[in-house]
Amino acid sequence: MIKKESRNEMRKVRHERIRKQIVGTKDVPRLSVYRSNKNIFAQLIDDEQGKTLASASSLKLQGNSTEVAAKVGVEIAKEAKKLKIEKVVFDRGGYLYHGRVKALADAARENGLEF
């Protein structure tokens, strides 16, 4: 019998492959996205120091999942503006660039983040 890998394990493999090429700095941090079944989280990360500069999540937001993801994108863009960050490197976390991940990225771009 052929053993099939779970979706999450395959996502982790994709994420490791992506992370080999993506590095966030203080000037150009990494915008990391994590998507659970109910919520979506975004962080601005400085990989050189290993610190999270800003974060946003959908824990306290309600509504349609893609609309909530867009609100998180707006929120993380506002946090970046406070820190005077304009450019980021987008890390989709191994997820497909579709649905909630795309909504978050588009909203962040519309509110001033460049990636």
Image: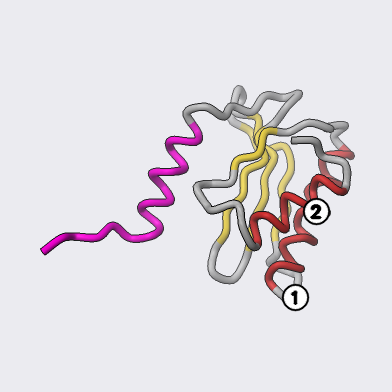
**Residue picked out by circle 2:** 107
Which residue is at a point 80% across and 53% down the rendered structure image? 107
When the figure is inspected, residue 81 is found, relative to residue 6, above or below; the finding is above
- Which mark is first along the chain, 2 or 1? 1
**Residue picked out by circle 1:** 62
Q: Amino acid at mark 1?
A: Gln
Q: Amino acid at mark 2?
A: Ala
Query: Which sits in the foreground, 26 or 113?
Result: 113
Mark 1 or 2, closer to the camera: 2
Q: How many marks?
A: 2
Q: Which x, y percent locates residue 96?
A: 54, 53
Q: Which x, y percent locates residue 2?
A: 15, 60
Query: Judging from the image, what secondary structure is the residue with disc 2 in?
Result: helix
Seen in the image, is 41 located left or right of residue 107? left
Q: Which x, y percent locates residue 38?
A: 59, 71
Which residue is at a point 28% across and 57% down the rendered structure image? 5
Was residue 6 drawn as part of the magenta stretch in this picture? yes
Q: Quadrant of the N terminus?
A: bottom left
Seen in the image, is 92 located left or right of residue 58? left
Q: Quadrant of the C terminus?
A: top right
Which residue is at a point 78% across and 48% down the rendered structure image? 76
Magenta segment? 1-19
